[in-house]
């Protein structure tokens, strides 16, 4: 009986050691997975769920929709719940359309994308020029990476990225106002053939356009 318990104990210990080793390997591999995602995933599409929690502790705001991107700088981020809103970037400008208000805001992307959380999805291969990466451990079956902006005026305090199988599964960030945002990605398809038209936007008739319209600095109603 003692020998039986001894063998069982050694087996359990061996399994525990293997589990710990696997966890350590996953943790060590988090940064490598992020580098792989940025380098190998040149385009993607999928679904997302987003939860925003204010510093005041008010009821979290939940939303969801679909996304697509093509590096560098082209993206389509479409909110479908609880209301419809569309963000489209063509690499130079970003359009934000509020369907209920029929209002379009146009901004130049410029160099600002490189030091923001959006750069993880939509940016180029200069990730580590803009972020300092550190191992964030393993939790919930994901290898986590802490990404800290190298520029102090990036607008957010910290960013955590959860990866598995070389794909980004979750993004958590806290901005300079203490607002926390968590985004879960699902049904992600890497490197699909995407129509270039998905990254172009024409304001609908009657829309109030604010900002740089078609790059000429005008604003008004179309």
Image (cartoon, grey):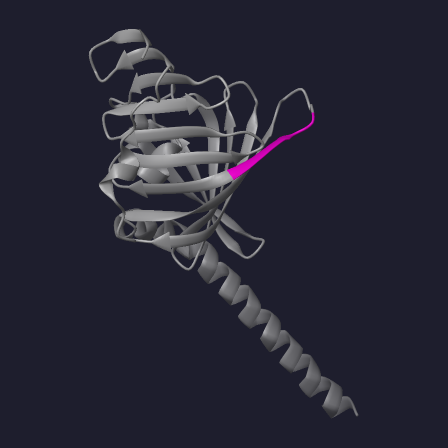
Whether 174 is drawn above or below 189: the answer is above
Give the tally of numbered discs.
0
Residue 209 in the image, given as x and y percentages of width and height: 35, 13
Image point (48%, 17%), residue name: 101
In-front residue for pair 29/81: 81
In-front residue for pair 194/75: 194
Residue 182 picture quarter: top right
Residue 16 in the image, given as x and y percentages of width and height: 61, 70
Residue 13 in the image, given as x and y percentages of width and height: 63, 75
In-front residue for pair 36/182: 182
Whether 191 is drawn above or below 201: the answer is below
Q: Look at the image and tell me whether residue 26 can be seen.
A: yes
Residue 78 picture quarter: top left
Task: Assign the C terminus to one quadrant of the image.
Answer: top left
Highlighted range, magenta: 59-64
Q: Is residue 206 left or right of residue 218?
A: right
Image point (69%, 84%), residue name: 8
Image point (40%, 41%), residue name: 67
Residue 29 in the image, given as x and y percentages of width and height: 40, 56
Instruction: Name the chief secondary structure element in magenta.
Output: strand
Residue that protrudes farthest toward the right in the picture? 1
Q: Look at the image and tell me whether residue 123 can be seen.
A: no
Q: Is residue 191 magenta?
A: no
Task: Assign the N terminus to one quadrant of the image.
Answer: bottom right
Q: Is residue 61 magenta?
A: yes
Residue that protrudes farthest toward the front in the picture? 205
Q: Is residue 43 left or right of residue 179?
A: left
Residue 214 picture quarter: top left
């Amino acid at each position: 009986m003692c020998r039986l318990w001894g063998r069982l104990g050694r087996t359990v210990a061996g399994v525990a050691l293997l589990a710990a080793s696997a966890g350590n390997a996953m943790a060590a591999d988090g940064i490598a997975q992020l580098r792989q995602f940025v380098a190998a995933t040149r385009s993607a599409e999928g679904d997302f769920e987003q939860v925003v929690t204010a510093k005041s502790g008010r009821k979290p705001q939940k939303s969801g929709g679909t996304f697509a991107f093509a590096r560098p700088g082209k993206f389509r981020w479409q909110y479908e719940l609880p209301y419809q809103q569309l963000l489209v970037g063509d690499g130079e400008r970003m359009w934000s359309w509020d369907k209920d208000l029929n209002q379009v805001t146009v901004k130049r992307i410029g160099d600002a994308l490189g030091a923001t959380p959006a750069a993880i999805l939509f940016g180029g291969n200069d990730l580590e020029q803009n972020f300092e990466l550190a191992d964030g451990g393993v939790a919930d079956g994901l290898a986590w990476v802490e990404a800290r902006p190298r520029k102090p005026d990036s607008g957010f305090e910290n960013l955590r990225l959860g990866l598995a199988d070389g794909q980004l599964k979750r993004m958590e960030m806290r901005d300079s106002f203490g607002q926390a945002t968590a985004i879960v990605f699902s049904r992600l398809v890497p490197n699909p053939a995407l129509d270039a038209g998905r990254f172009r936007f024409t304001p609908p008739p009657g829309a109030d356009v604010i900002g740089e319209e078609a790059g000429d600095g005008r604003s008004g109603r179309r």
